Amino acid sequence: MNDKKLAAASLAAQAMGWVDPVTRAVVPPIHMASTYVRDEDNAYRSGRIYARADNPTFDQAEATLAALEGGPKALIFSSGMSAATACFLALAPGDHVVAPKIMYWALRNWLATFATSWGLKVEFVDADRTDAIAAAVRPGATRLVWIETPANPTWCVTDIAAAADIAHRAGALLAVDSTVATPVLTRPIEHGADIVMHSATKYLNGHSDIIAGALVGARDDDWWARLRTLRAQLGTILGQTEAWLLMRGMRTLYPRVAWACRSAEALAERFAAHPMVSEVLYPGLPGFAGHAVASRQMAGGFGGMLSVRVKGGERAAIATAARVALWKRATSLGGVESLIEHRASIEGPGTPCPTDLLRLSVGVEDSGDLFDDLDQALRRAHNA
Ligand SMILES: *Cc1c(COP(=O)(O)O)cnc(C)c1O
């Protein structure tokens, strides 16, 4: 190999080019051990003591994700939620944080309930408006600004560079839930983010067969050490087999995401002209409110997630979801199989999600088949 810097897609495909030094295997083993032998002189020269702190099976997934995001270090977690909540639990009661009104529902719920009763002062803002973030930060008191872009389930876009600037001027850190963008489309650290979070359950794994999360730090500093310690103390580590499956899934991240982006863009355009659809929400559509910012900070596509608002309201939306065959009615996203979800039903009372909205996670099936299936469902629901 020469010194040419490899593209991220090449690093991912070969999991950083790892080959087992003893067996020459191209795929790493799964290390099942929960504990490691101490040396005779009482030292732990392997650097490993107990598997609640780390496991060699994590190494490749963490090193690969760090390289893809352009940060020095990554940590994988037992879920996206445990990765996200670690960022807030690493703060202190009384600290002020800013979070979006439109964001992953379960995390917003946790912030409004547990985190608030634990002592964090949480302020929810319209994060697609930079001036709203600026108005909410309190210099010296705000410790963390949390954003998600594009954000569930309306895919509104936050300007990462502007949010980072606002956070840093106030003495706060910027964390970005980049689950939907993936490092294929956006590398938030390059735009000034201090921490990148992923539900690795979604695109990074890509096969709907594990629950996992990840953080990538922009610096290997005290804050990062605190997150690492917190993971070991809370035991929010990923199982060995799941860590292995995560790395196996990440090898195909680039072709999967590229395919999903192409299909999602085609579907967005076709459904925007559909007689039973009142609106398509997708950052790739030129008329979408966040399109200009998305074009600046997303490269190579606008993601595999879109939502359609169905004419006829909630009943028509649920009736449409009932009539698909190829799309699967399920929550979650980012897998190879396409999913459809009436999002307001799962978010429940108090959701800001419109009730006529169907959330679509575009997989790697043929996009013509996906269009035809949803088209017939929309028409049959309309005529029912
Ligand atoms: C799924 C998801 C999460 C939560 O991740 P889990 O792996 O389910 O714990 C957080 N943020 C976004 C954007 C998600 O889609």
Image (spheres, rainbow, N blue to C red):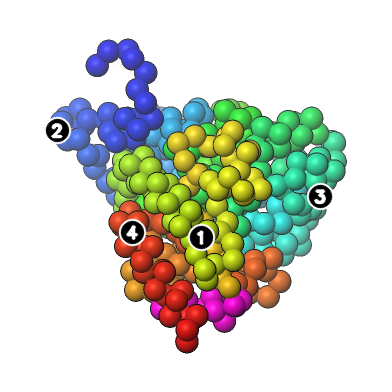
On the rendered structure, is 109 left or right of 257?
Answer: right
Percent of width and height locating residue 95: 79, 46
| CA–CA distance in space, label 4 to label 1 | 15 Å
User: Which mark is in front, 4 or 3?
Assistant: 4
Tag of residue 369: none
**Comparing marks 2 and 1, which lies closer to the viewer?**
1
Q: Secondary structure at mark 4?
A: helix
Viewer-nearest of discs 2 and 4: 4
Name the spot of residue 225 as percent of width and height, x first: 58, 35
Q: Quadrant location of residue 277?
A: bottom right
The residue shown at (63%, 56%) is 103
Instruction: Provide the secondary structure element on which disc 2 rests.
Output: loop
Q: Nearer the viewer, mark 4 or mark 1?
A: 1
- The answer to whether mark 4 and mark 1 are in CB contact below 8 A is no
- Distance of mark 2 from mark 1, alpha carbons? 56 Å
The Cα atoms of the two marked residues, 2 and 4, are separated by 45 Å
Mark with earlier residue (4, 1): 1
On the question of residue 321 being in view, the answer is: no
Residue 273 circle label: 1
The Cα atoms of the two marked residues, 2 and 3, are separated by: 53 Å
Give the SS element for disc 3.
loop
Q: Quadrant of the N terminus?
A: top left
Label 2 vs 3, first from the N-terminus: 2
Q: Mark 3, mark 1: which one is toward the viewer?
A: 1
What amino acid type should be assigned to the residue bearing mark 3?
Gly
Dot 3 and dot 1 residues touching (CB under 8 Å): no
Which labelled disc corresponds to residue 94? 3
Instruction: Look at the image and give the residue range highlighted in magenta.
Output: 312-323
**First in sequence: mark 3 or mark 1?**
3
What's the magenta bit mostly, secondary-structure-wise? helix
Q: Residue at (61%, 48%) from the top-left corner?
A: 287
From the image, tell me which residue sits under label 2.
Answer: 23
